[in-house]
Every structure is written in structure tokens, then in C-alpha cells.
Image: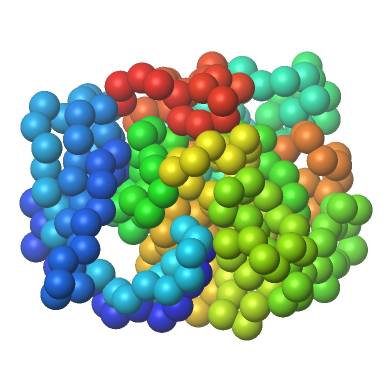
Amino acid sequence: MGIHAGIYMAAAILSAPVLTAGGGQSQANGNGQTAAVQTESSVSYGESAVSGKPVNVSFDAPQQSGSGEAENQMEGKTDTTEVTAASAQAGTADASRFVLPEEARVLVIVEGTGGSNCNVYAFERSSAAGAWEKRLETTGHLGMNGMSNHRHSGDKTTPIGVFKMNTPFGQAKALEGFPSDYIQVDDTYVWEDDTNKMSRDLSKEGERVGSSGYAGYYDYAIDAGFNPNGIKNQGSALFLHCSGEFKNYTSGCVAIEKEQMSQIRKLYGKYGSGASFIAQAPKGTFEQIYNTYGTNQGLSPERNF
């Protein structure tokens, strides 16, 4: 997801009647503007009802580059708070209600709070029967068009659902406690568009995740696990990664501060590959995804929000 400095969007966003979690499409016109169209079954932040009519949201869009999804984050401020008290509550989500495999030991919850803003929580449990304990709470940013359970390539939404995280990588050196399978990437690595996996086959189209254009953003990253089968036109390279210099939105990834990303990476490393999961939904809609892990080929659940 190629990221570069964009222009501020505040004025245009304030002028929009409703900024929704876009299940629709983004269309660019000749003036460099993008219109996000909310279709039926897309989610308005803070609501669980289905919109009866399409809502057009117009705003000035920054220029784009690269073939991936993690593009164009804008400047902002992220506050962070580390939490050690045992609690299964994460905003409007309840970690104890997610139906996950027995091997699940880490659960990251991303709660959309409006626009491209979100709260991010990390939980840990010591066994399948153990209670989820909150280890981290912070704020972050997600797709510039909000969240969607009908995501497709290029719509700049963050997919709703529950996914298994995989492939920890980054441009920075591994720290103590990082996963044993952590990959320090350079410009010989590409995240392939067609397979939605990382390789060193530079003949493939995709994101050059080790290139200087991703410095900061991809210091630490983990694949969020959406579209693991690489289904065409559903999107690829959707990560949990660092905020970098510009922080107001992504093209579908979730971005948090580097220190908090490092903490999640260490939780991932504590239990190894296959034990870490991520749940993503707008505020107030988690009821509809608690039991959806492993459905719909690793895409968002097919239901109305």
C-alpha cells in the first residue's frame, strides 16, 4: 500500500453530510476528487442499521502512487495508553465473546470510531480456557473511506471481520521478543498483488515493502489476514503497521504508533505463528462478527450491518 504525504482533507470532510464506512466504490474525477458511495449493506460509523439509500461523500483526494492499498496517510496526532488490568471489554466489543480456535492466544480488536479514526486494543490469554486480559489500548487510523464488509481493491476501506494475522515483517531490525519468523525486508522483497503474499520475485506486480517509500510505516508490520487466498479484486497487502510521519488515514490498513506496534509484535512472538487474530468493525457492530472467523474464504462476513 504505497503511502506518501497527502494534502489535508479536513475542510472537505467537514462538508460531507455523513462519513460512512464505505461498502461502495471510490471514483476519481478529473479534478483529483474522490467520491465514496455508500451502498446497501455498508456501515455508518456508530450504527448497526443498513442504509436505505446511497449517500455520496465527496472530498479532496491526495495524489496516489504504487499498486498496493496502504497509500497516502495524512498528518495527525495519536494518543496511546498501555493497559495492564485484566478486562475483556474493548470499547463496544467484548473479547470473551469471539469464537476463535483453541490455539488463539492474542486478539487485537480494531473499533472504528468515525471517519478514519479507530481505537485499538490488544488482549492475551494463557490457554484456550483462560480469560482474555487487556495488554494494550491505543488510538490509530484506518481506511480513508472507513470500514466495509464488501471491500474490493482500491476502495480504500478497512475490511470488517475476524482474521488470523500472519507474516511479521519490517524494515527495522528485530527486537528481543520478536517472532522467530520475523523477516527484515529490503528492496528485494515484494508483496504480490495476485497471491497476496510476500516473495522476492521482483517480476511480480505489488508493493516493494522494503523500499524507502515505506520507511517508518513498515518499520514493523503484520499481515492482517484478509483475503488469504488472494481472490482477485478483493484487495491485498492489508496490514497492521506503524503510523509513520503522516497519520490521518490509510488505504485500508490499520496504523498505530511504533511503540505500540512493537508491543503487539512481541505478543505475537510470544506464542508463534497461528496464535494471533484481529477483529475489525465499527463501533457498536461487533455483535455481528463474534462468530464469523473462518467464514467466506477469509473475506468479510456476508451479512448486512
Q: Name the one closer to the observer, 91 or 232.
A: 232
* Quadrant of the rendering where the C terminus is positioned: top left
Inspect this view and state whether residue 278 appears: no
Relative image position of residue 81 (x, y in whole percent): 57, 58
Quarter-wise, where is residue 256 in the image? bottom right
Classify 231 as above or below 222.
Answer: above
* Left or right of residue 263, residue 32 in this image: left
Q: Name the one closer to the observer, 27 or 266.
A: 27
Count of all numbered marks drawn on residues in the image: 0
Q: Residue at x 27, y 34 (%)?
A: 42
* Left or right of residue 240, residue 281 in this image: left
Query: Please, which colouring scheme is shown?
Result: rainbow
Classify 55 as above or below 173.
Answer: above
Q: Residue at x 72, y 44 (%)?
A: 166
Relative image position of residue 263 (x, y in whole percent): 72, 57
Relative image position of residue 54 (x, y in whole percent): 11, 37
* Left or right of residue 219, residue 151 in this image: left
Relative image position of residue 65 (x, y in whole percent): 43, 74
Q: Residue at x 63, y 70 (%)?
A: 208
Q: Name the one closer to the observer, 237 or 29.
A: 29
Inspect this view and state whether residue 177 appears: yes
Q: Residue at x 48, y 70 (%)?
A: 66
Classify 295 as above or below 199.
Answer: above
Q: Name the one closer to the observer, 185 or 219.
A: 185
